[in-house]
Image (cartoon, grey):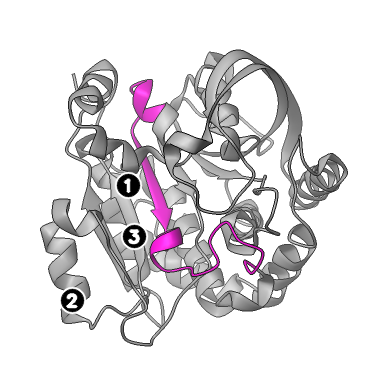
Amino acid sequence: MPGQGDPTELAARFELAAEVDRVIADVAWLSESPRGRGHHPEAMERAEKYVYARLSEAGWNVRAAPFEQRWALGVSDAGGRPPLWRRIRLFRRVQGVNLLAELPGRAPDRCVLLVAHLDSVACSPGADDNASGVAALLECARLLAGLPEPPAVKLAVVDLEELGKLGSRALAKDAEFTGNVDAVICLESVGIFSEEPHTQRLGGLGLIFRDLARRVSANQHRGDFALVIHRRSSTAVAQAMVAAGAALRVPLPVLLARDPRSDGWRGLLATVFVPLLANFDRSDHAPFWNRGIPAVMLTTTAPFRNRHYHLEGDRPEELDYPRLTALAAMVSAAAATMITRAVPAADQ
């Protein structure tokens, strides 16, 4: 396949094939109302059926993977912005459904997994958080299915992220599906961009990632970039997205922030001693880190840029659809070529 192993050529090809109208339609449909297994179950089931149908239409084999968590420590999904200590919950029993997809053909020995969560908080239609991530994943599904040979990529649309990543926690333990996964790309709140100065905040991120803070400051704090949070084990994935973003006709800047922790138990131990680092665990990439699987989170920084984060105003009209569509092309190119590149193993 032309360009295999090099995301730059494939990114340009995918950019031409991607369709903004499809992404607009997906976000609009998914964010008609809040969706959640507990607070808006009918809306959640409609969204689940919609995603299942769109993936099937694109040529993927899709299956529902129900799961149950007992005595799970998590958080409230009511929404708003209360302090963390007020959100912590212990769930005696919760049930959810992850949607898992693979392309027909020979199962690859190694693959990349794209992940996005489908649920929203109770008070928000969740256009950015996270209909944007699901819509980007659906566009990735269409683009990847159009390649002459099936790429080594799997997809997962997970449940109960807003309760504390319960869906991805269950998925990361599913050895049958994730046993051959070498890298995970998590799409989390990827739809908000702005060329206006002072639209990007960094908060505590700026204290830890000084190079990131310098670059954002030099650009007058414009929210015009995508951010990849990664670890040493997933540096190759992060670099592939930087290259793919730069290869687009209208380049999409991708900035990097490297979490200093190791994967697996050592990373968990480091978090106990430095709780501030837990802020980098706030999406579906973290359970894979904890299981020793290299992962990245791709985001437009959620509450650091989106003034309607976890609020009623997180609506479709707030999103930048041309850039969201370009982001899907970038991710598709990086994912499709990663397994031909050197993906480092988790830290030993």
- Label 2 residue SS: helix
Q: Which region shows up in magenta? A: 288-314
Q: Which class describes the residues within 10 Å of circle 1: few (<14), some (14-19), or many (20+)?
A: many
Mark 2 = which residue?
217
Identity, as a three-letter code, of the amino acid under mark 1:
Val
Q: Position of residue 4 (x, y in %)?
A: 40, 53
Find residue 227 and name its label: 3
Identity, as a three-letter code, of the amino acid under mark 2:
Ser
Indicate the quadrant where residue 135 lies: bottom right
> Of discs 1 and 2, which sits in the foreground?
2
* Residue at 19 percent of width and 59 percent of height: 206
> Of discs 1 and 3, which sits in the foreground?
3
Find residue 48 and name its label: none
Marked residue nearer the N-terminal end (1 or 3):
3
Q: Position of residue 296 (x, y in %)?
A: 36, 44
- Label 3 residue SS: strand
Determine whether label 1 and label 3 are within 8 Å by CB: no
Q: Quadrant of the C terminus?
A: top left
* Residue at 53 percent of width and 61 percent of height: 309
Q: Position of residue 228 (x, y in %)?
A: 33, 54
Mark 1 = which residue?
237
How far is mark 1 from mark 2, CA to CA?
25 Å
Residue 299 or 202: which is nearer the viewer?
202
- Magenta stretch holds residue 306: yes
Q: Is residue 263 above or below residue 42?
A: above
How far is mark 2 from mark 3, CA to CA?
15 Å
